[in-house]
Image: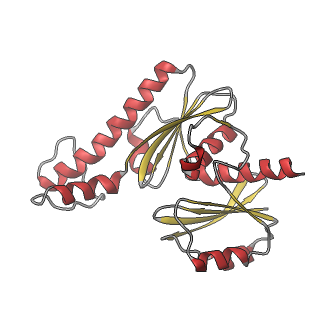
Amino acid sequence: MHLIVDIGNSRTKLVAFDEGTPIDECVTEGCHLDGLAAFAAKHPFDAAILSSTVDLTDEAERQLQALPCPTLRFSPATTATPLRNLYHTPQTLGSDRLAAAVGAWTLKPGRNLLIIDAGSCITFDVVTAEGAYLGGNISPGLHARLRAIDDYFPRLPLVEAEGDVPELGYDTETAIRAGVIQGMRHEIEGYIHHFNVKYADLLVFLTGGDQFNLANSIKSATFADPFMVPRGLDAILTHQLKVES
């Protein structure tokens, strides 16, 4: 059984995988590992993998070292994966981006894939049918866009993401919220259309914290999977253990 420790910019996700299937998870706000010991005690883990988009605190390091199983620290620059990484600067590639690409490839190997991760940022990454990770693009996420409007335009308010999203805003609050969310939808649909033209039989995966705010209105998003990054990390851990054996 594998323990997945996925530390993002705003949330930490602990997931238990049993033979490639997620069976339990614990999600906490922030980048701390306060729930790690209790979660690790619930399952007989024989290996763990860590992916982090932030620098770990000394306390987090101590909690990881106290785990009862060996922990692989995933690095896109040095860790072997099932994909051929063509990113020119793998040392700067976010581990969550490559892990999500591997997760999609694990579900649909041998297909052209577009992986869209709608989290703190929106990332668009492409994997070819031959198993090559080509790279992708990064765009501001939902909350970053809302905060930017408030930061750069003093007369405009900070608007919450939750609320009415009309086709056309009927007041300042709905105009901002609809402008941001509808703009994100059109941006995502534009990427999907572009890569559908470029790559035959493209499959699209949508994941990330804001995916379900978007999935219902993006008809061409084939798969919505909240476990895409942990799924990829589990596959990377399995691949690494095979390489070492």
**Where 107 sits versus 164, above or below?**
above
> Which residue is at a point 79% across and 53% down the rendered structure image?
19
Which quadrant of the structure image shows residue 73?
Answer: bottom right
Residue at 56% x, 37% y is 88
The figure's colour scheme reads secondary structure
Residue 147 found in image quarter: bottom left
Using residue 76 as the reference point, say whether residue 188 is left or right of it. left
- Tell me residue 52's x, y (percent): 57, 61
**Identity of the residue furthest to the right in this view:** 245
Percent coordinates x, y for residue 197 in the rendering: 47, 19
- Tell whether 158 sits left or right of 70: left
* Residue depicted at x 84% and y 47%: 243
- Residue 34 seen in the figure: no
Q: How many marks?
A: 0
- Image position, residue 8 (x, y; %): 52, 61
- With respect to residue 195, does 71 lie above or below? below
Q: Residue furthest left?
A: 155
Q: Quadrant of the N terminus?
A: bottom right
Please tell me which residue lies in front, 49 or 187. Answer: 49
Residue 73 visible in rendering:
yes
Residue 75 locus on image (x, y percent):
65, 53
Viewer-side residue, 79 vs 67: 79
Q: In which quarter of the view is residue 12 placed?
A: bottom right
Residue at left offset 73%, top offset 40%: 82
